[in-house]
Image: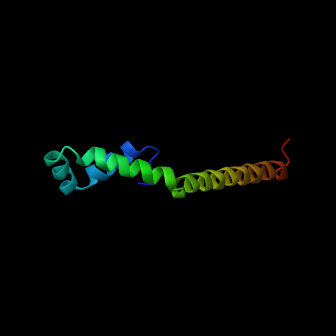
Amino acid sequence: MMTNVTAVAAVDEWVHAYRALQELEGEHAWFRPFMNAIASELLATATFGVKTRAYFGAAMSMLDLTTDAYIVIRYFNEGKD
């Protein structure tokens, strides 16, 4: 659930992953709004997903910087301008 940006998308992914939840959703009209409210509250208070995306983005940026520097150094070591 923490990997999704919105609560609706998180609940949708969760319900579609399990057949029993799909049946429960079909039988009870209150299930989806109830789960959306819980997911909204969880996403508002939990910072795990935000931190994970931020750290992953920072790590990818540093990796890109490192590979760019490696290519430039290798290019100049071969005697090219």
- Picture quarter with the C terminus: top right
Looking at this rendering, what residue extends furthest in the left direction?
Answer: 27
Residue at 67% x, 50% y: name it. Answer: 61
Residue at 37% x, 52% y: name it. Answer: 38
- Horizontal arrangement in the rendering, residue 47 relative to residue 75 (left or right): left
Percent of width and height locating residue 54: 61, 52
- The image quarter containing residue 30 is top left
- Horizontal arrangement in the rendering, residue 10 relative to residue 64 (left or right): left
Task: From the viewer's side, name the closer residue of 2 and 66.
Answer: 2
Total marks placed: 0
- The image quarter containing residue 29 is top left
Percent of width and height locating residue 15: 27, 51
Percent of width and height locating residue 60: 63, 52
Which coloring applies here?
rainbow
Residue at 41% x, 54% y: name it. Answer: 1
**Residue 3 seen by the camera:** no
Percent of width and height locating residue 11: 34, 48
- Horizontal arrangement in the rendering, residue 5 relative to residue 30 (left or right): right
**Residue 43 seen by the camera:** yes
Above or below 33: residue 55: below
Residue at 20% x, 48% y: name it. Answer: 25
Task: From the viewer's side, name the closer residue of 5 and 80.
Answer: 5
